Amino acid sequence: MTDGIMDIIKTFLDGVGVFFVIYLIGYSTFLFLAVVVGSSSLYRKRRQEKLKNTLFHDYYVPITIVVPAYNEEVTVVETVRSLLALDYRSYEIIVVDDGSKDTTSQKLIEAFDMHLIRRPIRRQIECQPEEFVYESTAQKVPLTLIRKKNGGKADSLNMGINAARYPYFICMDADSVLQYDSLQKIVRPVLENDNVVAVGGTVRASNNVQLENGRVKHYQLPRNILACMQVLEYDRSFLASRILFDKFNGSLIISGAFGLFKKETVIAAGGYDHTTMGEDMELVVKLHEYCVTNEIPYLIRYATDAICWTQVPEKLGDLCKQRRRWHIGLFQSMIKHRSMFFNLKYGAVSFISYLYFLLYELLSPFIEVFGVLTMVLAFAVDLINVPFMILFFLIYAIYSSVLSLTAFFARIQTIDLKISVSDVLKAILLCFFEVSFLRFVLAFVRFTAFFGYRKRKMQWGRIERKKIDLK
Amino acid sequence: MNVETLIFAYLAICTSMIVFNCICIFAFQHNDTKISKKSKEFEKKITEQIQQMKQGKQPDDKHKAYLRKTLKKTGNLTALDETMERLFEEDPDAVKQYLSAIYPVFVYLSMEYRKKDEIRAAYFPYVIKRFGILQNTSFGIIVDTLMELLHEPSLYCRENALQAIYSTGDCDCVIRALKIIDSGENFHHAKLLTDGLLTFTGDQEKLSEALWEEFDHFSTQMKVTILNYFRFSTDRRCEEVMQLLSDKSQDDEIRFSCIRYFGRYYYEPAYPYLLEFAENTQGLRWEYSAIASSALAIYPSDRATEILKRNLNSSNWYIRFNASSSLEEFGLSYTDLIDVFDGNDRYAREILQYRLDQKKAKQREEKQREAVNV
């Protein structure tokens, strides 16, 4: 190889090196701040609970729970049962069957003795027409089933919002279980500040967790290794980064599995976008845009103690499917609301949240794959210091593992969960595996997410469902 | 500074966070043990004092001094909370007498807790309410501390202080507190205030009278809160509420609240107003018609039926919805409503049909329940 080409490669590799140093310092600093802020917030929360800094209030704000369901015959009845057991006074449940091909609607009608009714629904947001409506007033709270033409999850949520009677609504998944006190906890930010338009709840993996009437009867890390690693990953993202974003009203995501929204604002902003895959993120970004553009004072909050238990995928194929979907959703939301990029009007949301999601979520798989290819090139031209590379990787892996563990332990001890010694050891071992293996697999999956996404973009993200262990 | 140093520095801090977590686990466990030990110590000492009181003596000064010293620590106050819960179950009257006898200790503590951070400060009014310290006593310094806590930015601090103030059963204290909240810059949800007022342990009638006397001195938002409290607590404020309803210069929100009041309590003089609002010939905000259509549910008459039937054709969803609900409340049959079903307005038909279907379903469900009970 001529000296000229070698010089060009050297300059290129130097440039790449500088880029990665800056990139990783940025990421390490973000993770570090996120975990420190997240952990200290959790300790403060625990202290508040112990010293009765809480609301002893029985009435709260009336809430509509919207449960979009598609082919959920295995879990839907148990999900509704668990919702009926919630410790809250004023709420209604609306299940929207999105043209299921199985017996989702029949199961509900039979289980809750529902009756057919000709109920007019006020169309404030566009959605597919309803086929029939069933109601039951024999339960603790009003229960409604709306069966509509298939239109996707976002479309079902829009139907639920149209039919909602109350000023706030909760969106959740049909395979999730809300903890008994989750409504009290998620509504608290609304009572604290009138400008709150949305509140995100905390999603936790329910695999291997025994729940009784929405209470944790027995907590144990999942037996399945993949699910177990996701527990660590969820802790890191929910209890660390989301708390940090919450500090400056910068949350860009409220999980579709559990979130509370002010109906009036969501309707004014146009409801869920059924053309995107990540309707949950898109709505939150849209709310930022809508409120800022219309100069409406607003807050999007995160409730660390409002808990929803959900099944995480136990098969790698299911996990890949889920992550591809999430990544395309992220891409669509960011492209659609690109006006937020480096826009002073949005302040920290633009310069911290949007930038973080762009660099460390959306582009990260490309950057990581580019890094690997650069390493291959450097190795080929013998310009790599292998021992240093291994040391650097080890430091990175240990650093990320320590952060995951910090988030995990902070969560466990601040909510008074008791875990066994074997679970502690399992967490320590698996966190290293998660950052050094699973992370790269998922980076590759996200990298390939765009191949053939047009074909799948209107489909419900399906993963294998198991009956929820509710005793 | 090179990159490795920075990463190592982060790593060191994170490792110390793990160590901190581990220490916390032990500290929390140790703390729980300490509290439960302290609680047992309190139990022994307090039981001795209660026994002494049963023999006609008062708690001795040494005991009070001990309480003053130990209860300054928030952890010890939580231990006392545990102790009192146990003792109260055994002999509530004796515990009440004991708490009343050690009232000066709480006066001292109120000054101490006022100096603490907002989380600790918020715990003090919680204890005051829980132990019923302000019941049947003269207030003074403790209430002054509670009033000061109402200026705190922490909602929990303010709410706990308010709860303690409601537990005094004293109208003047409550009004003083509401004025502080009203003039403060911190947002306090109206729902919390209304529901809080409903927990007032004194005479609710006297409180509503006192609130009315001071009504003009409150902001519009607080006036609405007070009217909501009237709505859920008493039917004896009809005249006063009527005065507000008929006063066109009042804020719309206040008049909406008044209409809701008369939707809960039947009051003949309000009827023509409700009809007028429901009909809305004066081009007022649509909310007047919607709320009045709902309020008319307890004023069945031909005129009301006529207006409500007309409101079923309104272009506003809420007016149609509320009108149909009231018509259902009137107990009208299909024949009585035939003109609506035969009419051209599909929306009116649909909403009314839904109400009648709902009524039938409810009746069917009730019958089924009765059959099951038999």
Image (cartoon, rainbow, N blue to C red):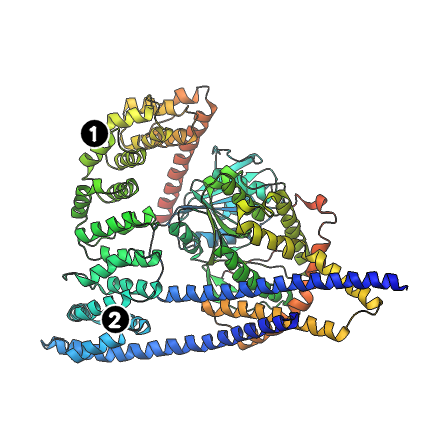
Tell which of A299 and A346 is nearer to you. A346
Q: Which image quarter: residue A152?
A: top right
Q: Is residue B176 left or right of residue B304?
A: left
Residue A432 position in % (x across, y down): 64, 71
Q: Amino acid at mark 2?
A: Met
Res. B69 image quadrant? bottom left
Residue A456 visible within the image: yes
Q: Residue at x 24, y 52 (%)?
A: B177
Neighbour tally class for label 1: few under 14, some 14-19, many 20 plus, Cα within 10 Å: few
Q: Are marks 2 and 1 in contact (CB under 8 Å)?
A: no
Q: Residue at the spot x=51%, y=68% of the render?
A: A219
- In this rendering, the answer to whether B151 lies above or below A151 is below
Evaluate whether label 2 is on the same chain as label 1.
yes
Three-letter amino acid code of the residue under disc 1: Glu
Name the element at disc 1: helix
Disc 2: which chain?
Answer: B
Q: Which residue is mark 1?
A: B268
Left of A228 or right of it: where is A290?
left
Residue A34 at x, y percent in the picture: 54, 62
C-alpha distance separating marks 2 and 1: 52 Å
Q: Is residue A149 above or below residue A442?
A: above
Q: Chain of mark 1?
A: B
Q: Classify 10 Å Cα crowding around label 2: few (below 14), some (14-19), many (20 and above).
A: many
The residue labelled by disc 2 is B84
Q: Quadrant of residue B80?
A: bottom left
Q: Furthest-left residue in view?
A: B56
Earlier in the chain: of badge 2 and badge 1, it is 2
Please tell me which residue lies in front, A113 or B307. B307
User: Which x, y percent locates residue A433?
Assistant: 66, 70
The foreground one among B338 and A354 is: A354
At horizontal 64% and vertical 57% (from top left) the residue drawn is: A360
